Amino acid sequence: MPSRPRARAPLGTGAGVVVGLVIVLGALTAYLLWSKSALSPVVGTVQSVPEISSTAAVNPGYVGPQACAECHADRVAEFRATRHFLANDVPRPGTMPVGFMPGQNSFSVPDLPVRFQMSEADGGYLQTAIRESAVGNETASSTIGFVYGARGGNDEVNFTWHGDRLFELPIVWLDKLGTWGASPFDRHGSGDFSRDMTIRCVECHNTWCEHAPGSRNQYGRDSFILGVTCEVCHGPGREHVAFHQGQPQAKTAHAVVQPARLPRERQMDLCANCHSNALKHRGPAFSYRPGLPLDDFYFTLRTKYPEDDHVANQTTYLRQSRCFQESDTLTCFTCHNPHLPRSATNAGAISCRKCHAAADCTDRDRLPAAVQDDCISCHMPERRKIQVYFRTQTDRYVAPVNRYEHRIAVYPAARQEVLLRWFRTQSDADSIRETATLSRSLAEHWREEMRTRRGDYRFLAAIDAGRESLRFEPDPATDQNVQELIAIQSTIDADLQDALWHEQERRYPQAIESFQRVLAAKPDAATAHAKLGTTYAVIGERQLAKEHLQSAARFDPDDPYAPGMLGWLAYLDGRAEEALTYHRQADAVEPYSAKIHYQMGLALVQLGRGPEAAVQFEKAVEIDPGLAPQIRQHLDEMRSHAPKGR
């Protein structure tokens, strides 16, 4: 148990402002289990403090695609067939997968006493979790409210409502495999094993909804404009619709963004809004507007490896391409027409020929005629992005979706695979020999990738590389390596879940032991370092806490948790300047965190800089209005101690 921090009374300048600080004994545990009730009381003297106000989400003018269809019926009709339009939908007959049919509608989790049943009842669709126990089965049924990717041909993810809070259910239909799979879920969980549906995910699958500021997953249930529709790229349409309804003779589009007329960077931002690692908010949800710099609204994570990416990060890799760097006009729209489903005329080699002549390919004359125009397979090969994976009845870490590599480049292994596919269609002796040679070469290429990735503790990526190798050449040793890698990653995941569970239950020795097992297998596991550091802090091992938190910050500089915790420890020890430095580091990567701004305010109070502290408290309440009552109380206490006449 940490010792009680001593109250400090630093001297202010000029007026000699004295600030008193009181922190409850459980402050570190409060940080560990942050909630609105975890606010530490602050008493101080200030010269001036602004009033605190609250904000609420208001629809800024989104009207939905049905309003657009009144004048643009054909365009909206063709757009309804796109993956963007289907990004979120409500379940309805004719759209749900065959996995709801009897005989296909159950999923048992291997090595866990949990199974799931999918069913249709009274026109609705249910996902039921059944946990077996010695005293009987515990059952929890949840009505499916939304489906991400319905009829999209990849994976269909289901969501449920608990009151006005939205949750992601764990069982997903994998279209290409024709089976159910489980997304990662907490095996120590209960009920339906769902997890919060955070706002950034909601933003990228919907045009708009009412989000309760400061909440992780509280939304206006009837406010959703489902899917990525017209207004995501053209801006809120209320003013545009009203103007043209009132002046139908007007020929010039009013109050609408036309993406084709935007500068290239602003066009790229339209897609990067969701097809990048722009994850950390700089302002309220759904604030970004077409035509504005995306960096003003989100901080973009700088991942080290592709498996660390967000679900989609195509714009980042496109920018690394010579094609992009040597062009003034190349954007996502060069290859993709967002109004149409992907087709032979809406992506692929036809897009390459907008800039490149056939003769530009220096390898063309050495390729079989049948593949000479297959630019994409050589220069943008399909690859599994294993940062999105599921567990099936027979396998783990299954990444069912291939995505095109958007860093346009020369990929020797991709060229070999193009040739291999062609030689496999031929029956002459030379082609058969070439097939064997290419298969061996590709298998060894991916085996080497597997070995390299394993050495770098990139176990997910190593699993994927091993499976790629087996695709070209069956090999018992490679298969054994893949199974070993799956066992390692499975143990890491289980130990991490155990550690977090022990931590939550305040069984700190067991939590420390589990975190240490994770780090023994994967020394660069930033989350394990960060949480182990906090656990050490709770039991009073400050030096060990600092070492692990610094390691977490080194291994994942885009996670604000470690600098935030280092700042909190410095604050508790009365080192307010150091605390402020750490909190500013956290704020740089998570600019819209009520917790970080609140803690910056505490450090400023400790330094006797009351007006600056009040600005941070104001920002914390802007982000999370639920903090207003507690912070108002703090500010009232600060005002009551203010010198008379100031």
Image (spheres, grey):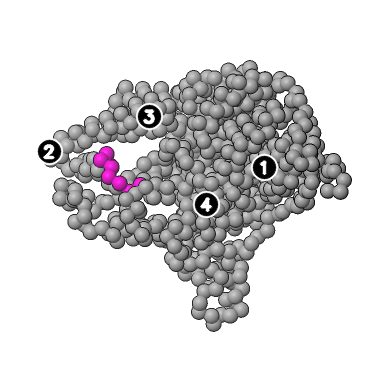
| Residue linked to disc 1 | 597
Residue at far right of view: 644
Residue at far left of view: 429
Q: CA distance from mark 2 to mark 4?
A: 55 Å
The image position of residue 226, as x and y in percent, is 57, 56
| Residue linked to disc 2 | 430
Residue plotted at (38% across, 25% down):
455
Q: Badge 1, how many Cα within 10 Å: few under 14, some, many 20+?
A: many
The image position of residue 233, as x and y in percent, is 51, 61
Q: Amino acid at mark 3?
A: Arg
Q: Closest to the observer: 491 or 92? A: 491
Q: Are marks 3 and 2 in contact (CB under 8 Å)?
A: no
Residue plotted at (55% across, 28% down):
550
| Residue linked to disc 4 | 295
Residue 284, above or below 549: below
Q: Closest to the observer: 66 or 317? A: 317
> Is label 4 in a helix, a strand or a loop?
helix
Q: Amino acid at mark 1?
A: His
Residue plotted at (39% across, 47% down):
317
The image position of residue 423, as x and y in percent, is 19, 42
**Side (left or right) of 494 relative to 60:** left
Considering only order in the chain, which callout, 2 or 3, is on the residue closer to the N terminus? 2
> Is label 3 in a helix, a strand or a loop?
helix
Q: Looking at the rendering, which quadrant does residue 595 occupy?
A: top right
